[in-house]
Amino acid sequence: MIGSNKSNLSPLLKQATDVHVDRGEGCYLFDTDGKRYLDFTAGIGVTSTGHCHPKVVAAAQEQIGKLIHGQYTTILHKPIQDLSARLADKMPGDIDSIFYASAGTEAAESAMRLMRHATGRPNIVVFHGGFHGRTMGSASMTTSGTAYTAGLQPLMGGVIVAPFPSAFRYGWSEDQATEFCLQELDYILQTISAPSDTAGMLIEPIQGEGGFIPANTKFMQGLRERCDKHGMLLGADEVQAGYGRTGKFWSHSHFDVEPDIVVTAKGLASGFPLSACAAPRKIMEKGLPGSQGGTYGGNVVACAAALATLDVIEEEGLVDNAGTQGAHLKERLELLADKDDGIGDVRGKGLMVGVEFQKDGKPDGARAEKVAKECEKHGLLLLRCGPGKQVVRFLPPLVVTREQIDEGVDIFAKAVDSSS
């Protein structure tokens, strides 16, 4: 019944906060009572230009007045053609061919399908702790937590999980973790999936749901070397870490490596549902006819918003801002960690920073939850991630200022202190 206290939303949707939002502006959300919240979730990294950036709003409004839906395998429209040209210029190497969908999981599945079609090989290597989506193919490639696959077995076959250099979890140095993971990858190619059966590798260069864990140059270049040696394709899932969030346009650029396939979504259109899978035409054309498509992919309003998003990112220098403000954010959080033994690690790049809580050397999800809830009471919204939800993640919009970073960290610091 409308207006009752009982929600008609699925009970399987677990709300991270108790906030009922009325409107958003820049880095702030306002609830139905008018209370202001500093939003360091950005819709899980989606509202990269802030809430309701005037330029994005104007572009969407103008497009809605002309055409709302033009299915892009039936007709073509100018926004999708212009966006494709702009995106191709942002892509690494010779990537110049783009397939659009609505959600990151669709784009990840299209990358997996393209790898198989282009190579004629069945198997895909993914990395422990990675998140690629909830639909069947993407869930089969996801190992950031069992919530996404519990009760869904058996999953799609042909997926092999290799270790990711999570130095903090292993309790090793980064060099030790990297050497171990590359050795294990070679062992996997010797004992589980022969290179001749392996189409490629799909990796989050900086893991998202798995705990905000960056890879490193030696590891990423090691993957590139093995893919080149064996004729396998390297795919970068940039859904959460890409599009300027880490202080570079793509997170894989931190590691001096060029993938064959890039998957992107989230910050692509400032909140409008749009995702993409991009590859060189010589690879994309090896896909089988009918293997790409969808009713809503490449929606004309979303494409118009995406074009405006790119304009804002470039005109306002948001990639550089992410690097600058992210460095300040991380420095302040590291100083906080030095004073609290319950903070085991602060990690990430740019405006994608995670704070991992621990107790007696084990993940402390309970304290992370307590801190996040305390922050909510005082007007700061944060989310958690990691297999035990022990990592509090900072994902401010890319328009965030130094003053807003300080405002957020001050609230977080008081919550940490009160929870100890």
Image (cartoon, rainbow, N blue to C red):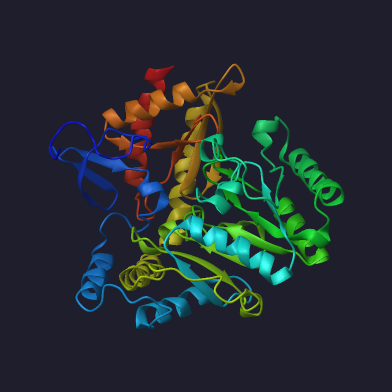
Residue 258 visible: no
Tell me which corner region of the image, top left, top right, bottom left or bottom right, holds residue 202: bottom right
Quarter placement of the N terminus: top left
Q: Residue furthest front?
A: 154
Residue at 49 percent across and 42 percent down: it is 353
Q: Position of residue 376 (x, y in %)?
A: 30, 31
Q: Nearer the viewer, residue 402 or 141?
A: 141
Residue at 27 percent across and 34 percent down: it is 379
The answer to whether 67 is drawn above or below residue 193 in the figure is below
Q: Position of residue 35 (x, y in %)?
A: 17, 37
Q: Position of residue 227 (x, y in %)?
A: 76, 62
Residue at 49 percent across and 25 percent down: it is 365
The number of callouts visible is 0
The answer to whether 109 is drawn above or below residue 403 in the figure is below
Q: Position of residue 334 (x, y in %)?
A: 52, 34
The answer to whether 342 is drawn above or below residue 136 in the figure is above
Quarter placement of the C terminus: top left
Residue 314 visible: yes
| Left or right for 201, reference 376 | right
Q: Nearer the viewer, residue 221 or 162?
A: 162
| Left or right for 186, reference 54 | right
